Amino acid sequence: MEIFLHNTLSGKKELFKPLKKGHVGMYHCGPTVYWDQQLGNMRAMVEADLIRRTFMLDGYDVNYVRNYTDVGHLTGDNQGDADTGEDRMEKAARREHAAPEKIADKYIANFERDIALLNILPATHSPRATEHIADMIDMVKTLIDKGYAYVTPLAVYFDVTKFKDYTKLSGQKLDDLESGEGHGSIASDPNKKHPQDFALWFLKTGVHTNALQTWPSPWGEGFPGWHIECSAMSKHFLGPTLDIHMGGVEHVSIHHTNEIAQSEAANGVTFVDYWLHNEHLVVDNKRMGKSEGNALVVPDVVAKGFDPLALRYFFLQAHYRSKQNFTWQALEASQTALKKMRKAVVGAADGGKIDKSYQEGFLTAVHDDFNFPAGLAVAWEVIKDPKLSDMDKRATLLYFDKVFGLELGKKEELAIPADVQKLLDARAAARIGKDFKRSDELRDEISRLGYEVKDSPNGQIIAKK
Ligand SMILES: [Zn+2]
């Protein structure tokens, strides 16, 4: 079946045609690992996972690359002022009194924990920017050789006026960008030719004299700019042209615009065939973020007793190109719905058939620019269909779950009260000590509390009576 996707570059829905039959090369801008990733970022990760799983369901071999930015992402970057900000990793290093490498280790581990909790498949490759400095230096050299970049006493810059269609992704006019607030103030480096010129390599001098992570380069000791990292890493793993590049909508006008300029200028070929951009998660219709003081992380959700996959279910309810509003009530409703959906699957026996007509409805939805909310609606039609057998419902829902990733076949874990658990522990000890009389007495006590215990080769199995 054909997949149609909305390409930011054309502003239109397009038929997906892979570069290589049966393969998808997909690059996703990963997190800057200086802090725990808030739920908005995790939503983006879930959306990419759902998209990847849709291609996998169609039999594609997906090479999914998601990087870790562990150097060079400055605090000014999101305002486009990449020349004057502080490196986020170094800011975190000062905050936590640890080396930037240790900060990266810590937050990569936390991120991978959250990825696993949300049942997001591990990336095919998840490179750290600091592992690819040589690739970045090579690309900067090429850009200088080809006349797209120049060196000042402070940095190496990309000359935006040399690249035709610099603003083709955002559709903005270069002249309009000049006056933008905080936008690459020329004052930060008097030798910059154009305010929009952005740094490919920062030298360990000026405001960056005390930079903690630097490497030698043909232009002097320094560190890479954030944008060149993605251009270099995507080329390393996926070649000069990618099928799909994904990222947050906030990256359209600067980060991705700069990636295109660097990659196409250096490689002389199209950088990306399809650009996908996800919208933000909002809280009470305000953006979720640390500066807004409303940033939530996955452990906050777990601490409130939620199944983390209830969050995944919640994300499934909005299209990736739409804003989604987070509330605890909505998460509660998602958890209830997830439980109900699992009940329909777990309560039925194996051996059913996937219902062809619902399968078609589901595929039509997810192939139409990844309309997962519509796919979810089909799942509810299945559950409510009185004509469909429980076994066929189970088979059909498990098929949908290859994309949903909600672990619908997972049995609800029984919350065992503390007093029952105490008796269970005592009974396990009695059985190890071969005190079967005591073991039987404890079984009766457990039974009086409303639970039935059985013995298996793997130990005691407890069920509610
Ligand atoms: Zn990127």
Image (cartoon, helix red, strand yellow):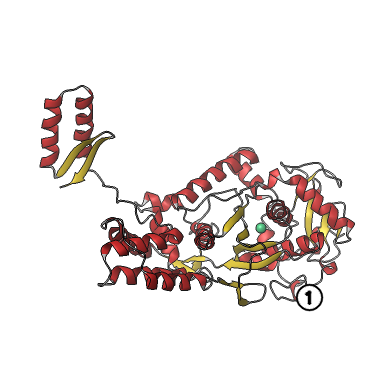
Q: Which residue is mark 1?
A: 175
Q: How many marks?
A: 1
Q: Relative to residue 284, is residue 257 drawn left or right?
A: right
Q: Relative to residue 348, is residue 161 drawn left or right?
A: right
Task: Quadrant for residue 443, please give it.
Answer: top left
In the displayed structure, 445 sits above or below 385; it is above
If the picture is divided into quarters, which one holds ligand 1?
A: bottom right
Residue 369 or residue 199, whichever sits in front: 369
**Residue 197 place in picture, x, y as percent:** 80, 63
Q: Secondary structure at mark 1?
A: helix
Question: Cβ of disc 1 within 8 Å of ligand 1?
Answer: no
Q: Residue at x 40, y 61 (%)?
A: 399
Q: Residue at x 48, y 46 (%)?
A: 113
Q: Is residue 211 visible?
A: yes
**Residue 351 place in picture, x, y as percent:** 31, 57
Q: Relative to residue 276, is residue 408 drawn left or right?
A: left
**Residue 389 place in picture, x, y as percent:** 26, 66
In the displayed structure, 148 sits above or below 423; it is below
The amino acid beneath tag 1 is: Asp
**Residue 20 place in picture, x, y as percent:** 66, 61
Residue 219 or residue 390, whichever sits in front: 390
Residue 97 or residue 383, whichever sits in front: 383
Within 10 Å of the Cα at label 1, are there few (<14), some (14-19), or many (20+) other Cα atoms? few
Task: Quadrant for residue 279, please give it.
Answer: bottom right
Q: Residue at x 24, y 43 (%)?
A: 416
Q: Is residue 208 visible?
A: no
Task: Quadrant for residue 244, please give it.
Answer: bottom right
Of all residues, the one furthest to the top in this rendering is 433
